Image: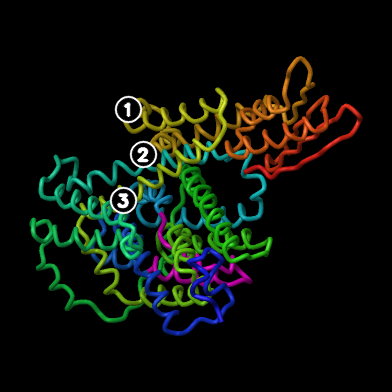
Amino acid sequence: MPDPAAAADGAGPVYNTEDKIPPSTLILTILQHFFALAVYFTYPVIISGAVGGGEAVTTTLISTTLIGCGIATLLQAARRFGSGQVLPIIPNSSYLPASLLAATGGGLPMLFGMLIIGGFAEILISRVTAFFRFVFPAEVCGTVLFLLGIAIVPFAFPLFFGSTNSSPLDPAATAVGIITLGSIIILSLIKKRVFKFYSTLIGIIIGFAAAVLLGVFNPEVLSGITDITPFAVPDFAFLTGNFAFSPALIIPFIIAVICIVMKTSGNITLLNTYTETRNPRSLRKGLFAEGAGLLISGVLGGVGTGTASSAAGLVVGTGIASRKVGIGLGILFIVCGFIPFIGWVFNLIPGPILGAVLIYAVVFVMMSGISGIASRVLDTRRIFVIILPILIGVSSAVCPYLYSGLPEWAEFFFASPLTAGSFAAVLIGVLLKISIPHHKELKLTGGKKARDLVSECAALWTMDKTQAASLSEEVQKTADSMNAESVRMELSRNRGQITVEICGADGGKARMTKVML
């Protein structure tokens, strides 16, 4: 019988992936995950609003997304197809900039078509994760995440301030946005777990109350509840074959996929460590399931989806890691997809509240990017890889007229800070790596220390700062004990492994290999 005190002691899960779980605990845990993740289903509302979709379009978009998320969550919880962890698939903010570009440029059919391409891309990427590091090192991914936040600003702030069609801010709507965002922030800072888990959900409720009091939300729209059918099959996109594709949108969606892959890799690694899962194929399967889920969402007519870091945190926080939770949650998502009332409720959320939720999410997206950049040892060339793309990305938002004379295919790259800056980050990053050596050697003469070589290589190869400091100490200690004459460091071609070879004065050698963080 699992020990309920185990989680509190940090010893591991109360219920591990294959443990039996009491029905009452299972149901309550499923509901807790559902309500904690409910706020993410506001993203379909934002996308529908961007294309002028009415209540019917929004409800359908939410329903198809729920069904797609349910199927993907079931795949993720299955050991045969996914990671075998409780890692729900939900609408993801990383896809918002690319999705809004697609939806506003070619309508929802364009969005669905590009999600299918993105799904295939992630399935392929799940087979070659070892080569990520060369094209998408941590500092590039951090830059992309930072730009992702900037790209959401033109959509989030007009919602927050109640601006429509470039109109000035609306004081009442602004007050609702401030109250909502302030409530979410304050609640998230309270130590009590219930407020941390549900800060966004409670903030939305408080925002609703403020919207009613300030006249931003008209309660009369609630009368429409009488027209809602209790059960309905949504209009799936594959039934009409209404898909569109654009080569110019491939890069924005691939960038979004890469962001998701990086985040999901961290989520799966966290849960594998917590549950002591030893399956080496778990990560590959997890990414495959996520990619399949994205493809399914596009086929059904939903929005971009990915794993939720908050759900991984909830698993660790509660100590309940049983796969049955993931299976139950997936089934619940699917059932909710056939209940139009769910989509109708989300469609009622006023714009300032949606804007507040988006801004809150953007803070963490951008902070994640800054943390990724700050964690690396950077030399001058890598600083250019970070700062120049950010400047290029911001220029596309601040000075869009600069790129208006370009060919249509090229102009599209500068339609968003995300596409312009991310493409620049990848291109500049790869170009500035061409001359970087993969091995360095230092003769320990004239007062030179082994740690000097580690410091030099750490900057050349943008190592993790903590790992570089630890390796420097270890190498220096070993070199001193051997009275070493030389030290050689080598970086593997896929940039995933570092090998250090220390040659002693007596001809002895010490060799250590580290996985690149």
Checking the image for residue 4, the label placed there is none
Label 1 crowd bin: few (<14), some (14–19), many (20+), radius 10 Å = few
**Percent of width and height locating residue 95:** 42, 51
Q: Quadrant of the C terminus?
A: top right
Residue 196: give x, y in percent of width and height. Answer: 34, 59
Q: As drawn, is 112 to the left or to the right of 382?
A: left
Q: Give the labeled residue for mark 2.
A: 150
The magenta span reads 64-92
Relative to 311, residue 165 above or below: above
Which residue is labeled 3 in the image? Answer: 358
Specify the farthest residue to the front: 481
The total of numbered circles placed on residues is 3
Q: Disc 2 and disc 1: Cα gap in Å?
A: 14 Å
Q: Is residue 356 left or right of residue 463?
A: left
Which amino acid lies under the numbered mark 2 shown in the image of this protein?
A: Ile
Give the residue at mark 1: 399
Q: Residue furthest top?
A: 446
Residue drawn at x 29%, y 41% as measured from the top left? 154
